[in-house]
Amino acid sequence: MKLNIAVLPGDGIGPEIMEQGVAVLNTIAAKFGHEIEYKTAICGADAIDKVGDPFPDETFEVCKWADAVLFAAVGDPRFDNDPTAKVRPEQGLLAMRKKLGLFANIRPVQTFKCLLHKSPLKDELIAGADFICIRELTGGMYFGEKYQDNDKAYDTNYYTRPEIERILRVAYYYARKRRRHLTVVDKANVLASSRLWRQIAKELEPEYPDVTTDYMFVDNASMRMLVEPKFFDVMVTENTFGDILTDEGSCISGSMGLLPSASTGESTPVFEPVHGSWPQAAGKNIANPLAQILSVAMLLEHFDLKEEGILVRKAVDASLDANVRTPEIQVDGGKQYGTREVGEWIVDYIKNSVLI
Ligand code: IPM
Ligand code: MN
């Protein structure tokens, strides 16, 4: 297969983890005889510094040229600590999602057997937990009308029927591919936008009689995720709730550095880690590249390259089993590996594995 890939490393640890993601993708391509053409483009604080725009037109053009975007992370404390900043790195990510029409963000939450003890939750509670969060990605408070002056500010949680219906259908599609259990997460006891979500979900439910649908308020869901994560199979929720719940999901996996995601919709899909740019770690070779590498696995699977995706996942599992881990998930007293060393180990594993 020939694939055009846009590479957007962004800020902070972005370039370091991206290097490993691309190395893994190249290794897979060489092994399976795929041809990949890359174009790298700027975004986030890096792009603000260079051209004053966190998602410049040239970057958008590269994304449109590509079959898929591999994205790392954006964000910079210079902007976080300045509430008056008019241009912010995160706007680049949001502009990319919006302009590419990426309304469905698929965020799987899984456990790795050898990392159960890294979770703050009890092993027996999380062992075997495996669910996906389908986060609506181009609507809600992130994109609704905003206002801010010195005395008041608001964000509007705006959703329309077609936006809600299409994301619910994506969620049902995934539920059918999995254990046929969908949990619609909302705050319908308080928010009008949530009541519309629930109304539309109730309308669609009879079309999917083979799927068990249940409804849960987001506060309850955030608690249930910690006390009974195995309850969930597919959850679907609006943009803001999905953002919050998926960071919480990393507590089940054991590290933010383990969660990949796929953003799909109307045009070029984007594959990106759930975590941010961790500026404090930039350049230190300590960031976990696995979320980026697992995002590569999701990219391969998106193009139906199943064996390729499986091999990446196998290599990741093997690295964890072999204790080739970055500091935040290393066993006490174990040797700590850097971002680069973990990536190189995985690349070697893929190179040396025998295809059957
Ligand atoms: C995420 C991130 C982004 C979001 C930020 C960087 C804008 O936290 O992908 O979860 O809030 O969507
Ligand atoms: Mn987030």
Image (cartoon, rainbow, N blue to C red):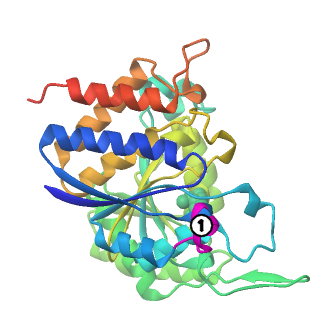
Residue 150, image x and y in percent?
A: 90, 82
The residue at the far top in this view is 333
Which structural element holds mark 1? helix
Residue 274, image x and y in percent?
A: 51, 52
Label 1, residues with CA under 10 Å away: few <14, some 14-19, many ≥20:
few
Ligand 1 resides in the quarter of the picture at: bottom right
Q: Nearer the viewer, residue 266 or 19?
A: 19
Query: In the displayed structure, does residue 283 sit left or right of residue 350?
Result: right
Image quadrant of residue 286?
top right
Query: In the displayed structure, does residue 69 sit left or right of residue 154?
Result: left
Residue 257, image x and y in percent?
A: 53, 40
For label 1, the residue is 50
Indicate whether 160 appears above or below 16. Answer: below
Indicate whether 9 appears above or below 86. Answer: above
Which residue is at 69% across, 42% downward? 280
Q: Nearer the viewer, residue 273 or 115?
A: 273
Query: In the displayed structure, does residue 157 sit left or right of residue 93?
Result: right
Image quadrant of residue 330?
top right
Quadrant of the image for the C terminus?
A: top left
Secondary structure predominantly adopted by residues drawn in magenta = helix
The residue at the far left in this view is 356
- Magenta stretch, residue numbers: 46-55
The residue at the far front in this view is 50
**Residue 285 makes an appearance in the image:** yes
Residue 24 belongs to magenta span:
no
Indicate whether 122 appears above or below 103. Answer: above
Query: In the displayed structure, does residue 106 sit left or right of residue 87?
Result: left
Q: Nearer the viewer, residue 95 or 113?
A: 95
Q: Amino acid at mark 1?
A: Lys
Indicate whether 226 appears above or below 69. Answer: above
Which residue is at 29% across, 31% downward? 314
Which residue is at 45% across, 26% downward? 341
